[in-house]
Image (cartoon, grey):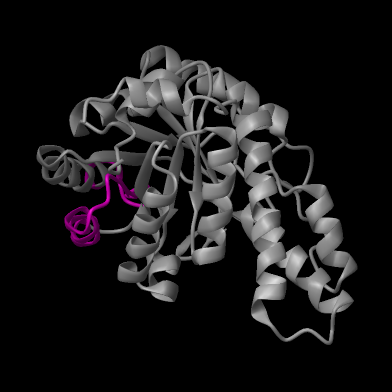
Amino acid sequence: MPLISTKEMFKKAYGKYAIGAFNVNNMEILQGVIEAAKEEKAPLILQISKGARNYAKLVYLMKLVEAAMQDAPDIPICVHLDHGDSFELCKEVIDAGFTSVMIDGSHLPFEENIAITKKVVDYAHPRGVVVEGELGKLKGIEEHVVSEEAVYTDPDEAVEFVERTGVDSLAIAIGTSHGAYKFKGEPRLDFERLEQIAKKLPGFPLVLHGASSVLTDLVEKANKYGAKLGGAKGVPEEMIRKATMMGICKVNIDTDLRLAMTATLREQFALHPEEFDPRKYLGPARDAIKEVVKHKLRNVLGCSGKAEEILASIKI
């Protein structure tokens, strides 16, 4: 099964469920995500960020993805560039085999964001690659993406942006944020704004970044074994489920995978200080990631069992 784009995924998902976009940085994370998708029979978006490329090198990551495709031939898989910051980078990964790219011009003035996004679209579409744009800013830190304040997406600007760029999906800002500290007070998403955007762009796929829930049990386990994650708070899962019914077709999840790995590694080191075989602690960490992803696919995103219907709609 070759890599696919998100086009058919989003057509099937719209208004019913969402596709999980999971950031991968190494073999254990990728294996955990793939095993979860195989057991849940769910489609996947594998995201590769700047940090992942710097850490593992693109050639290694793409070979891992190639192995995953052989291991999971019945799972629709898209490989997506997360937060691309230049046309040159988007071009590089398209040429390397990515089937989806995000060009993040959200920090630029509106007209400049349109210009760079359209340039990427014009290169990607003739090559069968889809493009995600972003309008509005999420507060927080995710690798090289840093914003001290949130700027919510304007619904009218969203319409103009989509029409003028030709993007295939749009990441919007409605209250989520990057990192493990998403809310100081009560969690709140601007569902009224989401509803307005969805009405103005009927049927158009919307994307939710910064959508990890910062699962309490993982935070507690990590802290129990020496972490210092006081005040960590994510997006309640019921809010994510509601958003998927309102036009959110892609939900980005990274922090929860990091927490699963970190909490498990800390536990293994504390309980088994005599162990020095990396497989003995990376294996349990991989299993923890798998369980988190299975939970997300089934209970939050609602895309368990949807692999077959997506594959049936694709002509290869």
Residue 1: image quadrant is: top left
- Percent across and percent down for residue 113 are 27, 45
Does 176 sit above or below residue 221? Answer: above
Between residues 204 and 280, which one lies in front from this camera angle? 280
For the question of whether residue 147 can be seen, the reply is no
Does 194 sit above or below residue 223? Answer: above
Q: Is residue 93 magenta?
A: yes
Between residues 281 and 70, which one lies in front from this camera angle? 70
Q: Residue at x 85, y 74 (%)?
A: 226
As drawn, is 180 to the left or to the right of 8? right
- Percent across and percent down for residue 96 are 21, 59
Quick one: quadrant of the C terminus? top left
Between residues 125 and 302, which one lies in front from this camera angle? 302
- Percent across and percent down for residue 225 are 86, 71
Residue 87: image quadrant is: bottom left
Q: Is residue 290 magenta?
A: no
Circle count: 0
Between residues 243 and 177, which one lies in front from this camera angle? 243
As drawn, is 63 to the left or to the right of 238? left
Q: Residue at x 32, y 25 (%)?
A: 8
Q: Residue at x 29, y 37 (%)?
A: 5
- Percent across and percent down for residue 259 are 70, 59
Q: Which residues are magenta?
A: 87-112
For the question of whether residue 18 can be seen, the reply is yes
As drawn, is 286 to the left or to the right of 53? right
Q: Residue at x 43, y 24 (%)?
A: 308
